[in-house]
Amino acid sequence: KAGVTQTPRYLIKTRGQQVTLSCSPISGHRSVSWYQQTPGQGLQFLFEYFSETQRNKGNFPGRFSGRQFSNSRSEMNVSTLELGDSALYLCASSSTGGKSGELFFGEGSRLTVL
Amino acid sequence: QKEVEQNSGPLSVPEGAIASLNCTYSDRGSQSFFWYRQYSGKSPELIMFIYSNGDKEDGRFTAQLNKASQYVSLLIRDSQPSDSATYLCAVNKDNQGGKLIFGQGTELSVKP
């Protein structure tokens, strides 16, 4: 069974640009969550999608957005990039979408903003 | 006060010893608790979860939960060098699906 796939794995952008990251969950998983990981702040929750609906949202500005498609694939977008957005962006999928916090993480997309 | 707190370490133990990792959380209503392991340069992987007070054992790993004290711990028996990683404690408040609050992680080093 294939794991969670994230693309691209690495990317470099400049301030003010926007970026779109993609995540394909494990087959059959309907919940996709996105996290930002930085050395200073650790792992922080961005948002969760379940059956194409945003179910939970973290404390990030509106520049961070996401969506989920009918095949459960998800994208997140960051507009007007800032230097502080440099981070590892992790996508995680879950099978139950309910009580579970049993997440399966992808390898991440490492974003560098110059 | 952070919602989930862990000692950042590094925690160094000799091979074969018991490693004890601790975590406290601030929201008394938190429902479920998780331990993830993250090797350097890799993504986190789930190793234990616990929902009820008491101990839960899985192989060399034991998770302990004390809701009254708002305390979660992970014990690793017979520690191996391959256990060297950062261990992340995570809390799911109100069973909010995939929304986990993570601690900063404890770096564990197991010396041969």
Image (tube, helix red, strand yellow):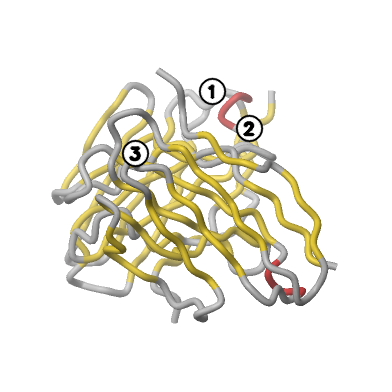
Task: Tell me how far mark 2 sits from mark 1, CA to CA.
Answer: 9 Å
* Front disc: 3 or 2: 3
Amino acid type assigned to the residue bearing label 2 in the image: Val
Name the disc covering residue B110, or none: 2
| Res B102 → quadrant | bottom left
Q: Chain of mark 2?
A: B
Name the disc covering residue A6, or none: none
Residue, far top: A1
Element type at mark 1: loop
Residue holding disc 3: A71
Amino acid type assigned to the residue bearing label 3 in the image: Asn
How many residues crowd around disc 3 within 10 Å: few (fewer than 14), some, or many (20 or more)? Answer: some
The foreground one among A66 and B30 is A66
Quadrant for the N terminus of chain A in the image = top left
Task: Tell me how far mark 3 sits from mark 1, CA to CA.
Answer: 46 Å
What is the x, y in percent for residue A102?
31, 42
The correct choice, above or below, for A90 with respect to B110 in the image is below
* Point 63% across, 32% down: residue: B110
Residue holding disc 1: B16
* Front disc: 2 or 1: 2
Tag count: 3
The foreground one among B50 and B71 is B50
Q: Chain of mark 3?
A: A
Amino acid type assigned to the residue bearing label 1 in the image: Gly
How many residues crowd around disc 1 within 10 Å: few (fewer than 14), some, or many (20 or more)? Answer: some
Q: Is residue B42 left or right of residue B1?
A: right
* Point 28% across, 42% down: residue: A30
What is the x, y in percent for residue A44?
50, 64
* Point 33% across, 21% down: residue: B59
| Res A20 → quadrant | bottom right
Task: Tell me how far mark 3 sits from mark 2, CA to CA.
Answer: 42 Å
Label 2 vs 1, first from the N-terminus: 1
